[in-house]
Image (cartoon, helix red, strand yellow):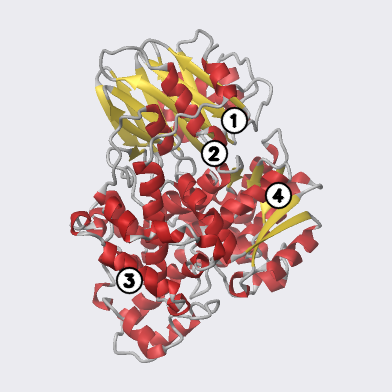
Amino acid sequence: MCGIGGLVALTDREPPDRGALARMLGAMHHRGPDEFGTYRDRHAGLAHARLSIIDLASGQQPMSNEDGSLWIVFNGEIFNYVELRAELVAAGHVFRTKSDTEVLVHAWEQWGEDAFDRLNGQWAIALWDAPARRLILARDRVGVRPLYYAVHDGQLVFASEVKAIFAAAPSFPRAFDPVGLDQTLTFWTAVAPRTVFAGVHELPPGHLRVYDRDGVRERAYWTPQYPADFGGSLDDATEAVRAALARATELRMLRADVDVGSYLSGGLDSSLIATLGLAAKGEGFQTFSLRFADAEYDEGEFQRLMSARLGTTHHELTVSRGDIARVFPQVIWHAERPILRTAPAPMFLLSGLVREHGIKVVLTGEGADEMFAGYDLFREGAIRRFWARAPQSTARPKLLDRLYPYLARSPVAQRAMAQRFFGQGLERWREPGFGHDLRWRTTAAVKRLLTPAMRGAGDAVAALLADLPPDFARWSALAQDQYLEVRTLLGGYLMSAQGDRMLMGNSIEGRFPFLDREVIALAGQLPPAYKLRGLDEKHVLKRVARDLIPREILTRPKQPYRAPDALAFLGDDAGWCDEVMSAELAGQAGVYEPAAVAQLWQKCKQRAAAQFSNTDNMAVVGVLSTHLVWRDLIAATPSTRVPAEIRTVIER
């Protein structure tokens, strides 16, 4: 895993600046501390910070084809590169390295834009065709790896992180984008190509973008599909999913020239992946778990049970509220976006534990809930649609009692209140977005704090629902809910704020078997009832895991990963919060009303946070993180720090 960046002239101007490439690498040093490289000609400059995983000896980047006409910088891994290399050798291509990077160079020469359909992996790629003055940017199917771009002073600037764009172009005007911020306060994330930064865009997952003498064009080479055309029985599906997951895990376990470990949360998904990872490796497997000082969030009992079952060398980290507060500014610097939950902070600390034990790569269970319908949101949608078909029923809404068994303050504990809340808008049950509507509206309540200047950015939900695939109306209700989750939360938040950024903040690569190309396609082919059977989420996965993981884990109520939110910012480690929540800083940032922020923060400091509503919790985290983004990424002078090892490369 790596950091990539570059500068491409869009008008006649001087060659890209070496100093800009150096500053770009300095800003992304954490993404690839092992090696650094640059390429520069009259029209383009490329920069690469390498975390060495495959072909340690000869996989340096930027890398070219034989005659030096085509250059690449690449962040990610192509797990089927061995098979693709064999095809390319048979077609006459000659290789100088054993890297997946060189496979990409020859794949482009052989297949052009069709090459991306053949890739099974996680990637952000920039290819520079020097004779044609053509730049190709591409990103993996679900957005595991980030890629941003902006136009400034007659040149395109692109990078794995926004801070690298700001470092390369210090005069770039930095400000919040009201539309991107509005999306974040609705969906938990801006929806690509939007970001929260004005003028900075994110290449959407599954897209490629081409710049050449004719201008710029962009297209999707892949979009989520839910044909539900699997012709076999549930038993057939179980075997197919088991085989696909085993292949996906084996590829991610063995296609590395360094040791690979695994996260172990104590739930179904990570336990299954760790089991399959050990089967692929055979022995000497390390697992890593996150525990909490707050018993409400802790899953240590199940983590230790699973580790003992597998016989792994197990490491665990117990996180307190103070730990979350202590690292939160650093987390936001890496995340580069406002967030509404503190969940990324413990994940950042966990990746640090992995690094301490000399592991560079970990398998994780992310993606299972999106692909196999594991979230409470999917069960909520099923109950509400069932209830909506007989809205006068008194029995159907009682199904709500089966939601949220893990919450100390469950929203369904007060039945009358729960029925009023979940009964909203039942008449719209056939409309797109129905399954997400309550979540989106609950999150959007944070917007009550916005200043007048930041309001009126448009209707984020209407804009999203106006841009749906042609087949959307023909999909099942569950498939529609899954698509919207993938379109918004998966790439924009889970893979980014909790995934790539928290891993790469400690120079760790995450690998996600549930987001394998074949697994994604198979999950889309399964009938809805194989995934959500009644209210039994991830039904087919549980069948896959029946003889692989302990019954105690298989039958336990689902407990989503969570962390303390507003309560984390009340202790001695949160002294920085007063400044960040001050009326002065709120006035300077211009996002939230200073008086409203003061009132919210006072309520929190009076320790009323223990009785905070879900919306208040999100508001505290949202304001803190937004103000940190403003202070450290918008108002601050972009970093010009260039470590000596980077300066040496640039000046060669």
User: Pointers 3 and 2 in contact (CB under 8 A)?
Assistant: no
- Mark toward the start of the polypeptide (3 vs 2): 2
Q: Mark 3 points at which residue?
A: 599
Disc ID at residue 532: none
Q: How far apart are marks 2 and 4 (CA)?
A: 17 Å
C-alpha span from label 3 to label 4: 50 Å
Look at the image and tell me in which quarter the C terminus lies: top right
Badge 4 is on which residue?
277
Q: Earlier along the polypeptide chain: callout 3 or callout 4?
A: 4
Q: Where is residue 355 in the image (x, y as percent from the top left)?
A: 67, 44
At label 2, which amino acid type do we have? Gly
**Element type at marker 4?**
helix
Task: Confirm whether residue 223 shows in the render.
Answer: yes
Pinpoint residue 606: horizontal percent, then vertical percent.
44, 76
As measured in the structure, the alpha-carbon distance from the residue carrying label 3 to the one carrying label 2 is 47 Å
Identify residue for label 1.
Answer: 81
Q: Is residue 485 visible?
A: no
The numbered disc on residue 121 is 2
* Residue positioned 78% across, 58% down in the render: 310
Single out the residue that lies furthest toward the top: 67
